[in-house]
Amino acid sequence: MVGRDAVLVWWMPMESPARSARNLTLAAALFSMLPLLIYWREFQLLFFFHDDWELLDGYSTNTLPRWLAQVFLGEGILPLFKLLWISAIQSLGGSYLAMIVLLWLTHFLIALLFGRILCRLRLPAEAAGFSVLMFGLAWTNIETLVWSMQWSAQLGILFLLAAWHLLLCILEENGGEPIRTAGYALCLLASGLCSTRGIVFGAVLAAFILLRGTSRRNLRLCAISLMPSAVLAMAMWWFAPHHHADLGPAITYALHYLLLNPLYLLISFPGRAVDGRALLIFGTIKILTIAWAFHRASREAYPLLLTFLALDFATAAGLGYGRSYTGVANTISSRYQYISLLCFAPMAGWAFASLRKEARVMVLLLAIGLLGYPWRRHIQTWAVWRGAEIRGALRQNADGERFDPSSLTAGRARQLIRQFDLH
């Protein structure tokens, strides 16, 4: 038997670490799609909600150029997202379930690109796979994956990761650089035209470039990275209303976002509240995990980890400026978990990879339960709140009555349902 085993080991090609990492990240991305399949009935109940109606109403009462140029609900100028969103509504025949599937397919593609970046920047296979699983499966992404308006945030991240891949090609390879550089700049611009948070993504990748060296080419790439951010920031400054956030509340809001996310919603205990105790508990766990990741990581992994930290800080700063008026209790909203998970997952991945094999198996099973099992309870709640109740109100409410948090009446919503064949 020993001789036979030796022959098999010699004959079968050894899997390279890079291929092993790619396979694990692909498996994790596929596994992350399970909630959509398992809770398909609940996803079928979901319907257009709040900002969806505002978008449809704005499109139907304006010319396309005017609608694309409008500032959306005081948030920002998002013409590319609007164009893609309304095109999806029309091409998918007004089906909200089809829009939800589109969100999940985008999520799957983001998970793949995220995993590929981790592989290209030499994260160990176990760390890369766990990172993708944590980001992809977490139930706390629920609002991003059940509300078509959140395609905006997804597209911003999708274009960021595409830009990052092009940047790595420019930094690592010769030939075709002008074409890749143009594509890189366009992806960063597209990110900011889909999501207000995408405005800072150019600065984040500029930091990544500088962490890789300060050669003349790198400095030129930094300037190219910052140009879309500068153009979009100027456009926002001139055309979007200013919140005039006070510095103190903005910093407080940003710190709460940084210290509480993404762990606050994932870890539940009696008496939990957004207070000093929560900041101490979840902030300490997060900081220790990040510190351990840097301790275990090789120096060549530092640019990757520092870039995700920069993205986390930049997102916190943007939210502090734009959302501090909503109060610190809003910092742990499920709509803010997507980027936070993306930034924290590689740190958790390094911590996971540093464990003994037996411990990794136990932690993996615990993580799957913690990340995935709560989908069962939460998707049922959301299917009623943002599905069955809205559909029922649209059938029963009088034309002049409100039916959800949007500014539209039930009568106006029924007109849009007929116009766009919404179902």
Image (tube, grey):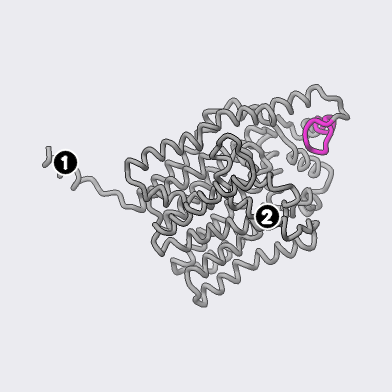
- Helix, strand or loop under label 1: helix
Type of residue at label 2?
Thr
* For residue 210, side relative to residue 81 (left or right): left
Select label 2 or label 1 by which is in front. Answer: 2
Q: Which quarter of the rendering shows the N terminus?
A: top left
x%, y% of residue 290? 48, 55
Marks 2 and 1, the one that precedes in the sequence: 1
Judging by the rendered image, the residue that carries numbered circle 1 is: 5
Q: Quadrant of residue 405?
A: top right
Q: Which residue is mark 2?
A: 252
Q: Amino acid at mark 1?
A: Asp
Image location (x, y in percent) of residue 200: 64, 60
Instruction: Please name the residue shown 71% across and 56% down the image.
Output: 250
Q: Is residue 323 above or below residue 91?
A: below
Whole-Å distance between the Cαs marked 2 and 1?
Answer: 61 Å
Is the C terminus in the top left, top right, bottom left or bottom right quadrant? top right
Q: Is residue 215 above or below residue 258?
A: below
Taking the image as shown, residue 214 lies to the left or right of residue 143, namely left
